[in-house]
Image: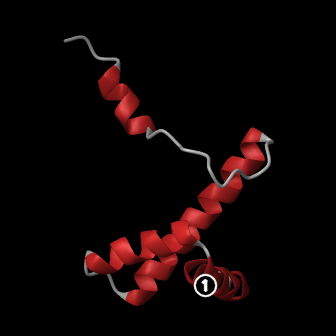
Amino acid sequence: MADKKLKSLLFLAAKTAVAHNKEYSLYAERKKLEGKPYLLIMNNVSNKMLSTVYGVIQSRRPYDLNHICSDPRKSVFLNTPN
């Protein structure tokens, strides 16, 4: 069972982030161009926000707007022998 209060708060936060944060608005626009429904896009933005918050807590560093995250999936391919 989902926590309805938490889910509605995350939806409102995602809606605000898409309206006021360039990173999240570009992400939402990309998903829209892929043909995703609006509620799915907001769910994806909510998950992305939660991942960002979790990363800040794990790293114990303040949020850095200019931080570039390397994709861990790509590092697997970079370390393979030719």
Residue 8 in the figure: left or right of residue 74: right
- Mark 1 = which residue? 11
Question: On the image, which quarter does residue 71 sit in?
Answer: top left
Query: Which quadrant does the N terminus fall into?
Result: bottom right
Residue 58 in the figure: left or right of residue 40: right
Horizontal and vertical percent position of residue 68: 54, 44
Horizontal and vertical percent position of residue 27: 44, 69
Secondary structure state at the residue bearing disc 1: helix
Horizontal and vertical percent position of residue 4: 67, 88
**Residue at screen point 53% across, 66% down:** 23
Look at label 1 and name its amino acid: Phe
**Residue at screen point 61% across, 46% down:** 67
Residue 74 in the figure: left or right of residue 12: left
**Residue at screen point 25% across, 81% down:** 35
Q: Is residue 38 above or below residue 72?
A: below
- Direction left: furthest residue: 82
Question: On the image, which quarter does residue 59 sit in?
Answer: top right
**Residue at screen point 33% across, 23% down:** 78
Q: Is residue 75 above or below residue 25?
A: above
Within 10 angstroms of label 1, few (less than 14), some, or many (20 or more) residues?
A: some
